[in-house]
Image (cartoon, rainbow, N blue to C red):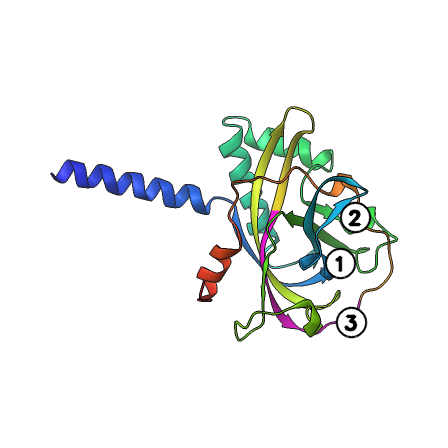
Amino acid sequence: SISARISKRKRQNAMTQNKQLGVFMLEDVRIAFAHGLWQATTVQGQGKPAFSTSFILPKNHKQLGALQQTMLAVAEAKWPTKGAETLKALIAGQRICLRDGDSKPDVAGYPGNLFISARTYTQPLVIDGARNVLTQAGGKPKSGDYVNARLSIWAQQHPQHGKRINAQLTGVQFVREGEALAGGSPASVEDFGEIEQQATAAAEFGDLFGVPK
């Protein structure tokens, strides 16, 4: 019947919207700790090994407003009627994935910029501009290069670790070479939240760029 088809279409639309909630393509940013794309490690010896890296963006990056809106959207979805209020408190407490690089003056490339820390248990897809899969042996991207990063922004409410807005890494596309970043302290536990097991993974990044599975 017509009503049944409409109901089915509404359910499909709802599923699509839910699937895409928080998915964000961060364009033309510098990558730091690029080895984390291929090497799963723990953070200060804590937790399950994960692939982790960070992305550096200027404070006037063209997508900053859209990124903030995405964080607000996932906060409102997680905490209805209190999303904006909760997000404001998390920002004040530096419990979001987007942070001021001036808070880590000893990390190369961070001062004067913003940075996003992201990780995943599933090795992310890494491709070049022609959509060829890259490996660590190929030498790119290296820390300091410019990339596009596909992130899954999501809201955490953990009984032990509390509330956060996190970023899960789903894939990276090499854009161009940049000045190499070296030295600096490694990531700290505070840079990351828990990893959401059901968050979108690297296969969706492949779909976006037309990479065969």
Earlier sequence position, callout 3 versus callout 1: 1
Q: State the mark number for residue 179.
A: 3
Alpha carbon separation for disc pair 1 and 2: 9 Å
Q: Which residue lies under the disc numbered 2?
A: 187
Residue drawn at point x = 65 percent, y = 35 percent: 164
Label 2 environment density (alpha carbons within 10 Å; few <14, some 14–19, many ≥20): some
The rendered magenta stretch, by its main secondary structure, is classed as strand
> Marks 2 and 3: in contact by CB < 8 Å?
no
- Residue 109 visible in the picture: yes
Drawn side of residue 151 relative to residue 141, left or right: left
Q: Nearer the viewer, mark 3 or mark 2?
A: 2
Instruction: Find residue 157 and report its image quarter.
Output: top right
Alpha carbon separation for disc pair 3 and 1: 14 Å
Residue drawn at point x = 58 percent, y = 49 percent: 67
Nearest to the observer: residue 101 or residue 180: 180
Q: Which residue lies under the disc numbered 1?
A: 33
Q: Is residue 99 above or below residue 160?
A: below
Label 3 environment density (alpha carbons within 10 Å; few <14, some 14–19, many ≥20): few
What kind of residue is marked 1? Phe
What kind of residue is marked 3? Glu
Q: Is residue 175 magenta?
A: yes
Drawn side of residue 90 relative to residue 23, left or right: right
Q: Magenta residues, as a range?
A: 168-180
Q: Is residue 158 magenta?
A: no
Drawn side of residue 129 relative to residue 14, left or right: right
In the rendered view of the protein, which quadrant contains the C terminus? bottom left
For the residue labelled by badge 3, is the local secondary structure a helix, a strand or a loop? loop
Residue 117: x, y in percent? 69, 49
